[in-house]
Amino acid sequence: MATDPRFFTTAEPQDLASIAAAAGLALPPGADAGAQFTGVGSLAGAAPTEVSFLDNRRYRDALRATRAGLVLVPPAFASDVPAGSLGLVAPQAYLGFIRIARLFHPEPAPQPGIHPSAVVAPDAVVGEGTEIGPCAVIGAAARIGARCIIGPHVVIGPGVEIGDDCRLHPHCSVSHAVLGRGVVLHPGARIGQEGFGFVPTPEGRFETAPQLGRVILGEAVEVGANSCIDRGGQEDTVIGPGTRLDNLVQVGHNVRTGRGCILVAQSGISGSTVLGDYVAVAAQAGLTGHLDIGSKARIGAQAGVINDVPPGADVLGSPAWPIRETWRAIAALKRLAAGKDADGTAGRAGAAKTE
């Protein structure tokens, strides 16, 4: 199915040489470097003038049947490319495809200027080439870098600093924060609001602790729709460069992540927990506060993490255990439910059923 031009910027047709260069791949011997292609598509839906890819053996049959004119494939699947298609061998086929797709469908460029309905404080600084959309609000002494896109109804609080080439989609709010270059906030993201810090009083009420820190988003951080990152209580909340938050993620006050972390949908990180570099937290996982999660650790879906996790460890379950222990426990539980002892023989429950 062709990409709908109402929603996506579409470039002119591209020749094979440009496509290969975008993916960082070499052309096969004898290939026509000037051959033209019009876009990208799936193996099942691509036309003879479009580019597709394979990176999962489940789709091997789809590759053999594809009509795509050009297909990126790992070396192991090069022989499965049909006669009517040209195969480009790529060690990371999906990565190459992403770069080609971006060639055909580049991000919209900013339309420099400030919409008449936007409210911009007189002492705010807006960088060259930046677009400020309808009904956006830019607070006093805020600083916005060059070539940014500030979407409709975005609210940027007083003193906030935003680096060059950032994209803030509609209805984001940012306060008490410093954003590095190339940060992307998807619709409804909330950055810098008060953290969840309070103390019960003798009268049975709650006294809110002043939240006096900031949020620091490193270069190329991306925050999904309706995700929230609270500002620090007395220190800063820091999200390391290149980290990605999916939609509906909660990051509490004083949390610090390293570089390149991934936080998947509906996961939550409680206050003052520290993540090393390249930590992955799967969907609906919850981490309690004041933990230390080592670099390259992986937290499984719906895990409940209440203890520190060493570097490189995989944990799963609630409470979270090392993944092999979790699977052994699940297997033992299944045996018990089936009325069997650990050695597989009928246990008391099984024996009772036969009496």
Image (spheres, rainbow, N blue to C red):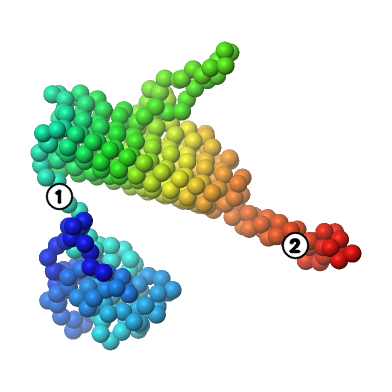
Q: Which amino acid does label 1 sit on?
A: Ala
* Quarter that holds the N terminus: bottom left
In the rendered structure, find residue 146 and report the number of the disc placed on it: none
The image quadrant where one finds the C terminus is bottom right
Looking at the image, which residue is at 42% across and 25% down? 233
Residue at the image position 31 percent from the left and 70 percent from the top: 42
Which residue corresponds to mark 1?
A: 109
Badge 2 amino acid? Ala
Tag count:
2
Q: Could you tell me which residue is drawn at 30 percent across and 43 percent down? A: 187
Q: Is residue 47 visible?
A: yes
Local crowd at mark 1 within 10 Å, few (<14), some, or many (≥20)?
some
The percent position of residue 150, horizontal first and vertical second, equals 20, 39
Q: Which of marks 2 and 1 is nearer the N terminus?
A: 1
> Taking 322 as reference, is 32 above or below it?
below
92 relative position to 58: left or right: left
Residue under circle 2?
338
